[in-house]
Amino acid sequence: MNWNARWIWHILFWGALAPLVVLIAQLLSRDLGPDPGKTLTEELGRWGLIFLLLTLTLSPLKRFLNIPLLRYRRMIGLYAFFYACLHVTAYLLFLADFQALWEDLLKRPYIMVGAAAFLILLALAVTSPRSMVRRLGKRWRTLHKGVYAAGILVVVHFLWQARADLGEPIAYGAVLAVLLLSRVKRRTVLPASSSSRNA
């Protein structure tokens, strides 16, 4: 890793911790509103989604703007999982009723959708080390396409539990749709271009 890449790594690494530091400071100063547990849970989930979208943004940045940030994709993806873990932990600590947890899962479908997304992110995080890439081979790439499903599930989870204020989850959904469509377009264009070269 050269000098510039090392600086970028440190900026991204420590910058990704900034939202957590701000939330902890707000929690300690009692600046998270009348229901701090709920606010903390929602903010941690929001940042998990933001980092997930950032992970999906790096390939289009390289392809369309030639911004070489792909080497940091694993780190940002792990931060998405990190904030998802904190979101789940905060939910269990502040919002969940352990005596009726299973009933909550059945009554509130958005919780089941969020749990499914979390399990996908867990599988991606566990298989993210380079040793797992070598061990899984071609299956690793297939498995990690699950990030698209995770993104869709997280947006649905956000949209479902938002109820009245739908503007923000719809905006995140629109960003995700653009990122996914950019990949679909690439896959449909590449075969045509390769066949024209062979002609």
Image: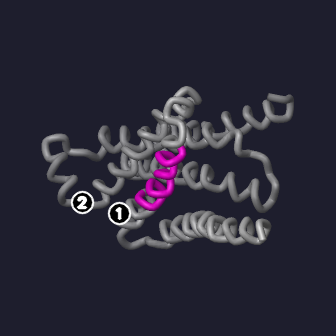
For residue 153, what is the image quadrant? bottom left
User: Where residue 42 sits in the image (x, y, percent)?
Assistant: 43, 52
Question: Which residue lies under the disc numbered 1?
Answer: 161
Left/right placement of residue 180 relative to residue 100 reads right
Q: What stretch is highlighted in magenta?
A: 141-153
Q: Which residue is drawn at 64% across and 67% down?
A: 182
Residue lying farthest to the top in this orientation? 131
Main secondary structure type of the part rendered in magenta: helix
Q: Which residue is drawn at 37% across and 44% down?
A: 119
Distance from the alpha carbon under mark 1 to that under mark 2: 9 Å
User: Where residue 164 sits in the image (x, y, percent)?
Assistant: 38, 73
Left/right placement of residue 59 relative to residue 92 reads right
In which quadrant is the C terminus drawn? bottom right
Question: Which residue lies under the disc numbered 2?
Answer: 108
Tell which of 71 and 193 is nearer to you.
193
Tell which of 157 and 149 is nearer to you.
149
Left/right placement of residue 154 relative to residue 18 reads left
Tell which of 11 and 28 is nearer to you.
11
- Asked if the stretch drawn in magenta spans residue 36, the answer is no
Q: Which residue is drawn at 16% across and 48% down?
A: 102
Amino acid type assigned to the residue bearing label 1 in the image: Gln
For residue 196, what is the image quadrant? bottom right
User: Where residue 140 sits in the image (x, y, percent)?
Assistant: 51, 41
Does the rendering let one see residue 29? Answer: no
At label 1, counting other C-alpha atoms closer than 10 Å, the crowd grade (few under 14, some 14-19, many 20 or more) is some
Q: What element carries label 2?
A: loop
